[in-house]
Amino acid sequence: MSARRQPIEYGEASSEVRAVYDDIMATRKTDWVNNFWKVLAHDPPTLERIWANVKQVMGPGALDSLTKELLYLAVSASNGCPYCIASHGAAARRNGMTEAQYSELLAIVGLANETNCLATAFGVPIDPQFL
Amino acid sequence: MSARRQPIEYGEASSEVRAVYDDIMATRKTDWVNNFWKVLAHDPPTLERIWANVKQVMGPGALDSLTKELLYLAVSASNGCPYCIASHGAAARRNGMTEAQYSELLAIVGLANETNCLATAFGVPIDPQFL
Amino acid sequence: MSARRQPIEYGEASSEVRAVYDDIMATRKTDWVNNFWKVLAHDPPTLERIWANVKQVMGPGALDSLTKELLYLAVSASNGCPYCIASHGAAARRNGMTEAQYSELLAIVGLANETNCLATAFGVPIDPQFL
Amino acid sequence: MSARRQPIEYGEASSEVRAVYDDIMATRKTDWVNNFWKVLAHDPPTLERIWANVKQVMGPGALDSLTKELLYLAVSASNGCPYCIASHGAAARRNGMTEAQYSELLAIVGLANETNCLATAFGVPIDPQFL
Amino acid sequence: MSARRQPIEYGEASSEVRAVYDDIMATRKTDWVNNFWKVLAHDPPTLERIWANVKQVMGPGALDSLTKELLYLAVSASNGCPYCIASHGAAARRNGMTEAQYSELLAIVGLANETNCLATAFGVPIDPQFL
Amino acid sequence: MSARRQPIEYGEASSEVRAVYDDIMATRKTDWVNNFWKVLAHDPPTLERIWANVKQVMGPGALDSLTKELLYLAVSASNGCPYCIASHGAAARRNGMTEAQYSELLAIVGLANETNCLATAFGVPIDPQFL
């Protein structure tokens, strides 16, 4: 038994798992489910829980859909998660992200990592104007 | 001599450093400079370099100013840099970020850290649709 | 000369390195040594030092062997180290970890990364009850 | 308005927020709520969502309560989140963690950070036995 | 359009991009440009900006070239960036790093990750002698 | 009992702990021990083990003492560990680090964090010349 879990396809999934897959496809108006969910499907309570979280957090709210996907993509790029960069990059493009916007997003992510590091390393005191 | 460098105030700064402070205030239309720059001022070439980077990256482009500040804030929150959360939180608010938007931003940052971690830990294979 | 060091097999190892390999196999009651040690073997003092650390820390103590391996695996999953997830996942299974336990472990690791991020980003003040 | 949100006490909370506080206290059999939840309370949907996650993940399952708290504490220590170390350290002690166990836990966390770093830096190839 | 950008070769690059490639080769006295720059070339302002930063920071100064490359390599190894370990490992070797020095560097990186983690987890108070 | 352990002073330490304190002072030719060790002293086997590691790794070898301390400091700054920045910053200064060198070190650390992030986010393919 390996540490790496194989994706569970729709045809081999339990009805409990299929219900989540169906909700993912209906919510996203797509006809397929990406591997992240198919891997989580080895543990149905986690699959249901994480999907409920994503559905709530990424659903309609005070920020528009594109901005939400840009934020998710920026954090994923900062954390260096190749899978999440690929999946949320695709989602951001579906929501209208242009290549020029992606370039600027990555420039911000890179620069923030530099200045976050410097501010923390120096222990810069927070200005009273920011409190 | 301590590892922590004290902020250098305008009145005690060299003309080289004052020129950067002046450009920061002119660019931002403010009458003060925050501590991050005053700490970097111990090393004028770095002060000039980092400011030139921030000015270019955060200036007008394909993403609007609010979105840029939201992205910077999201990465800073994800990295847990208290100074940058405070300074870019203030900048985002100046650019119109509401409390409801800040709440959603943090919800995305928290959730992305969870799913980035899971996707990496599982080594989820990237779907061909994302390539 | 590449930055990536090739594993040094038992047959090509010095007697100094073989002595560590022998102790690893005797301690673990296995007849093979995994690549982590074979890569460290390019630097015998580091090989000996790291093995001595692992042997001491993971040996008998106040926590049972399974709990120790679960903790090692959880930190490795949180840090996103594929090699360590694979090797300590195997070790945890040898010590009795079930697939259901592994699922719960990963759920905790993912959730902790979310709440750690939120607590740090918010700068939540530590309750006096916890001090 | 500061980036740092103040804890919302029970007496000043909405009924929606109080319902979560009540469930936290009932589930944990305590008569107080810690600051993490009081800070999340500025955003009730997130408060409810994160609490539902913690309740599900940390509830009865394949791992016993002490092991779950040890894992949460280990990840929090690895991530360097002072608030979570304090809160989950307290929870682990309530579940029976001894000082000797805490010492061993931290030794594992520290060592895992060293070996995770080395395995990743070296790009150690995963042994076929682990696949 | 994929999230992963393909390297842009000299022959297909714009004159703006070629000017940066030419400066990289002239500065480094080499006849080729590595993929990092060829990928950044999709966004010429970022290519120019990052190169200007690297040229300034890694140029002659108070630290000699080998020490600078060792520091870059150590941070890259600590962050687990395979590309940067490979490229700065090669640069350090060109500047004279021996295999024995590389072994010691990695031993320091690994140990620092362990003790950084322990110091942060314990919240060790900074000694007045260090302030 | 708090998660934060108080430093154990020489006068209240066991003979086992005092032996380590004595060796630290003799090795470093100082007449005091810093808090990191006094906090580890709650767990004597870990105190002895970590000190043995530091003594071996930071002792004479292929890299000179100043370079070793610069590397330790750079990794600590990159990881944002305030205690380790303070303690290894002091050690580096004792070994001759100038303020100009410290400025350059931090510039490298900041820039490496930016480019490590970009290289990982882009998944830049490693050039065959580096393999």
Image: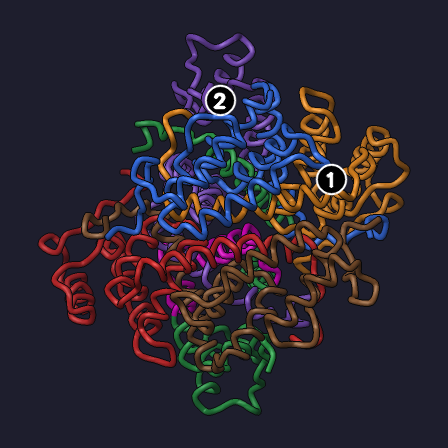
Chain colours: A brown, B red, C orange, D blue, E green, F purple
The secondary structure that most of the magenta stretch takes on is helix
Residue A51 placement: quadrant: bottom right
Q: Residues within 10 Å of mark 2 (few under 14, many from 20)?
A: many
Instruction: For mark 1, name the chain.
Output: C
Q: According to the image, label 1 marks what residue? A: C101
**Residue pictured at 20% horizontal, 71% vertical:** B27
Query: In which quadrant of the rendered view does residue B126 lie?
Result: bottom right
* Helix, strand or loop at mark 2: helix
Task: Identify the residue shown where x is 33% and y is 41%.
Answer: D13
Can residue A65 be seen here? yes
Magenta segment range? E53-82
Please state which of residues D5 and B47 is positioned toward the viewer in this rendering.
Answer: D5
CA separation in Å, label 1 and label 2:
43 Å
Q: Which residue is mark 2?
A: F24
F11 shown above or below C111: above
* Residue located 61% across and 42% down the image: D56
